[in-house]
Image (spheres, grey):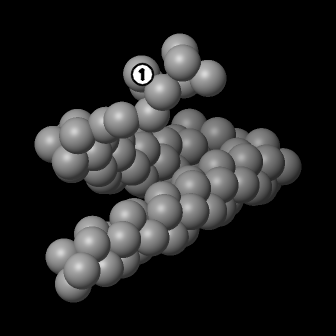
Amino acid sequence: SHIMSEYVRMTDTERDQIDQDAQVFMRTCADAIHQLRTEAHKGVQSAQVKEHRSAVLDFIEDYLKRVCKLYSEQRAIRVKRVIDKKRL
């Protein structure tokens, strides 16, 4: 427990940096998915390959949306705690 106590404490600045980095990363992922979607059908003749690529990209995009939702929920909890702390 002593070792864990050293790592539990993060500063607000560190948390803000993680939030900022996470937002940039999620935006970068969304842009990459969009770019892949644009390029996925270039030069492909087979409808089956096009459909497969679309399905894979839909799955990846859905996964990213779920990660973003989870991140937003966690961030909302953090913001609520900060507001509650300021009220006290």
Residue sitting at x 19%, y 76%: 86
Residue 87, quarter of the rendered image: bottom left
Q: Can the viewer see residue 68 in this picture? A: no
Q: Is residue 29 left or right of residue 13?
A: right
Q: Nearer the viewer, residue 17 or 29?
A: 17
Residue sitting at x 79%, y 48%: 52
Residue sitting at x 50%, y 70%: 73
Badge 1: residue crowd in 10 Å (few <14, some 14–19, many ≥20): few
Q: Which residue is mark 1?
A: 6
Q: Position of residue 14 (x, y in %)?
A: 23, 37
Q: Secondary structure at mark 1?
A: helix
Image quarter hosting the N terminus: top right
Residue 28's place in the image compared with 77, above or below, is: above
Residue 67's place in the image compared with 43, above or below, is: below
Residue 46's place in the image compared with 59, above or below, is: above
Q: Can the viewer see residue 43 in this picture? A: yes
Q: Is residue 3 left or right of residue 49?
A: left
Residue 76, quarter of the rendered image: bottom left
Residue type, label 1: Glu
Image quarter hosting the C terminus: bottom left
Q: Nearer the viewer, residue 70 or 10?
A: 10
Q: Position of residue 63 (x, y in %)?
A: 65, 55
Q: Position of residue 5 (x, y in %)?
A: 48, 27
